[in-house]
Structures are given as structure tokens and as C-alpha cells.
Amino acid sequence: MNMTSRPTLKDIPRQRWLRIIPPILIACIISYMDRVNIAFAMPGGMDAELGISATMAGLAGGIFFIGYLFLQVPGGKIAVHGSGKKFIGWSLVAWAVISVLTGLITNQYQLLVLRFLLGVAEGGMLPVVLTMISNWFPDAERGRANAIVIMFVPIAGIITAPLSGWIITILDWRWLFIIEGLLSVVVLVLWAYTVYDRPQEARWISEAEKNYLVETLAAEQKAIAGTEVKNASLGAVLSDKTMWQLIALNFFYQTGIYGYTLWLPTILKELTHSSMGQVGMLAILPYVGAIAGMFLFSSLSDRTGKRKLFVCLPLIGFALCMFLSVALKNNVWLAYAALVGCGFFLQSAAGVFWTIPARLFSAEMAGGARGVINALGNLGGFCGPYAVGVLITLYSKDAGVYCLAISLALAALMALLLPAKCDAGAAPLKTLNPHKRTA
């Protein structure tokens, strides 16, 4: 074989960045808008009209993540062995129906049921899209590709904050759910005509780009596995200590993320005594900061190959800013600056974090592994909002925010305890290959 004729990363076309990333990003943005619009609906009139307490508001925000458990592993497996494109397509239909129905509810128990069902409908999204990304981007690009896709969180925040405030001000909270639900139908059309699961299926890709991707990704899998692992069981993966460290890290991280995002409008309203329109505008800046943070830390991680460090540092920054947002509450603008700082670190660790499973697992197992990590880790998405709601009811908003800061500090500790071999460029973790031959 003539090795000199094989193209390098700099030599090949890069159409996948424009053809694959945007539609995935847009679909993720819609899912996140449907997920967090309740954060604006609550202080925008829903809580008063339906008689919802702070504890019930936290439960309604968090019960989504109980439903979120169900399709995590199946979604990851479908993306590996079937079609992630079809999976997300049907998910978009479900998101639209459930969101519109939420705008028609008459009591808090209907809200709980629909929030649970929305969690089920969105549950497979992240493992599916991350698996699709791993089908299109080698390890050297995966940190940035993951970060761009996971940027759906701040971009959705930038869009949702002013849009939700405006809709509630002009119409009411019910139209917020109806209008944003209908947007899913529009995105479904875009999704159906633009996305492909793998390079081998795309008609627009050049032969040079396709061959490079197929060969490079196959070589990465051979380096990770060392031998055939198609029959490796999920039980073998779950028996590994590192897997549970990743789950614990993601749990404490998601507790902080969703505790922050689902209570941010309420915190801002209480801090500034502003209208919902003004709260929507104030909520934009933290998400603008989040985009900058994600680009910075994912680029530094890809450049240096250090994954652990650039998961840990943003978590420490997030915890510190969360603490300062309460400690500085007597000065409105300093407290707001700390909340913007929380936004800067909000998703900075996420793109880097999700490069780690692709280094530890074969392609056969990575989809299911991502699903398990995301499913169990996202129980933190239930605990964060609910814990804040309970602490607000029993003590104060300050106690709820301090709880989130502690959770993020624990996530940073979990990142420090990850093995050095999680870093790019290190030898693959051999313990995760249950069929590895020993001498």
C-alpha cells in the first residue's frame, strides 16, 4: 500500500462541517427550547394560574429527566446499528405534539404528565447526535465538533430568553408552548432533507473526504479495541470503575446546569425586580458567555490533548461563580456579573467531556455507553431543579444556589479522579476491552 498517497486532515475537503453540523445543531436547539421554556412560563403566569408552589415548580422542571432515562441506551444503539436520522425525525414529531398540548393544560398534574412524556421523547437525542458526530469526525476534530453541537444549549438560551419574554408579554404563557411546539414541525422538514447518518450514505461528499473518514475512523477503532469486541456486553462496560466515575461526574454537572438554567429567570426576576420582557433580555448575556467558554475550552483541549484538565477547570469556575452570585447579592450588578460568569462556564466542560467515551469504548459499545452515562448522569437534571425548589420552600433561594455550587465542586473532584489515560494521545484503556487476550 502506498502510504504517501493517503491524504492528511489538511489536504481533504471539509464539507461535513457545513453539511452535518448545522442541521444537528438546529434540531438540538429546538429540543432545548421545548425543555426549558417552562423556566419562563412559571414566573410569567403559569405558577399563579395553576397554583404551582416552588416545590411543585421544581418537580415539574425535574420530572422531565425521569422520562429522559428511557430512550438513552436504545437511542444510542439505534444510532450505531440503525438510523439516528429516523430516530430524531420521529422525536421532532413527538416534541411538537407534546409542546402544543402543554399550552392547553388546566392543572399542574397534566403538566407533570406532559413534562414526563417530553423527557421520554427527548431522551435519545444526545446519545444519537453524539454517535452521528463520531461517525463523521475523527478524534482530532471531535472535541470541536461536539462543542459546536452542544452549543445548542447557549444558542437556544439566547433565542429562548427574549422570544419567551416577548411572547409572554404580548400574548401569554400558553402561546409560548404552542408557538415553540410548531417550530419543531418546521425543523422536521429541514432535518428530513439534509442529514445523513454516515459518510458512506451521503451523496455530496467527495471520494477523498469519504475515504479519509472511513480509514481514519476504522484505524481509531482498531487502536481502541485491539481485537474484535462486537459481542462485548454492556454489563462488562458497567463493571468498570471509570464508567461510574463518568456517570457521577455527569450527575453532579447536570445538577448544576439544570438547577441554574431552570431557575435563572426566577432568580433574575427576584434580583432585579424586572418585567418578564426585561428578564428575557438579561438572560441573553449568560448564554452569549457560554458560547465563548465552549469555544475556548474545547479548542484548548483539542490543541493540547488534555481532556481531564479542561473538564475540571470550567467546573471549578462554574462552582465559584455560583457561590459569588449569592455572596454578592447586595450589589445587583456584581451578582448579575457572577450569573453571567456561570453562563461562561455553563457548557464549557461538556464538549470536552463527551470526547472521553469515544476513547474508552469501541464503536459497537460507544452509543450504548453514551446513553448510560447521559441517562444516569441526567438524573442530576431532576435533582437540581427539585432540590432548589425544596430549599427555596424550606429555607431561601440562597440555600438552593449554594447547593448547586457544592454539586459543581463535586463534579470537578470527579474530573480530577479520572485516569490519565482519558487524555487524547494517551494509550487506550485496555480494561474496557473484555475480549483482550492476555499473554
Image (cartoon, rainbow, N blue to C red):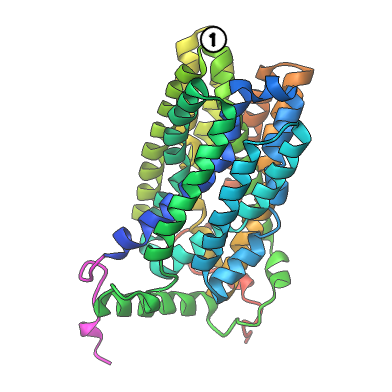
Identity, as a three-letter code, of the amino acid under mark 1: His
Residue 129 versus residue 293: which sits nearer the camera?
129
Picture quadrant of residue 302: bottom left
Residue 307's x, y, as percent? 47, 53
The residue shown at (28%, 92%) is 1
Q: Residue at x 54, y 78 (%)?
A: 225
**Does residue 413 appear in the picture of this structure?**
no
Q: Which of 264/244 is in front?
A: 264
The region drawn magenta spans 1-14
Give the quarter of the image for residue 197.
bottom left
**Relative vertical location of residue 95 with respect to residue 217 in this rendering, above or below:** above
The residue indicated by pointer 1 is: 273
In x, y percent, where is residue 226? Answer: 53, 81
Q: With respect to residue 191, does 280 lie above or below?
A: above
The single residue placed furthest to the top in the displayed view is 330
Q: Residues within 10 Å of mark 1 (few under 14, many from 20)?
A: few
Q: Is residue 124 visible?
A: yes
Q: Main secondary structure of the magenta part?
A: loop
Quick check: 182 left or right of 253? left
Asked which quadrant contains residue 305, the reply is bottom left
Residue 24 position within the rendered picture, expressed as x and y whole percent measured from the top left: 43, 56
**Count of numbered badges drawn on the protein:** 1
Q: Report whether 189 appears left or right of 261.
A: left
- Please say whether residue 129 is one of the residues in the magenta stretch: no
**Image point 70% across, 43% down: which residue?**
114
Residue positioned most to the bottom: 1
Numbered disc 1: secondary structure: loop
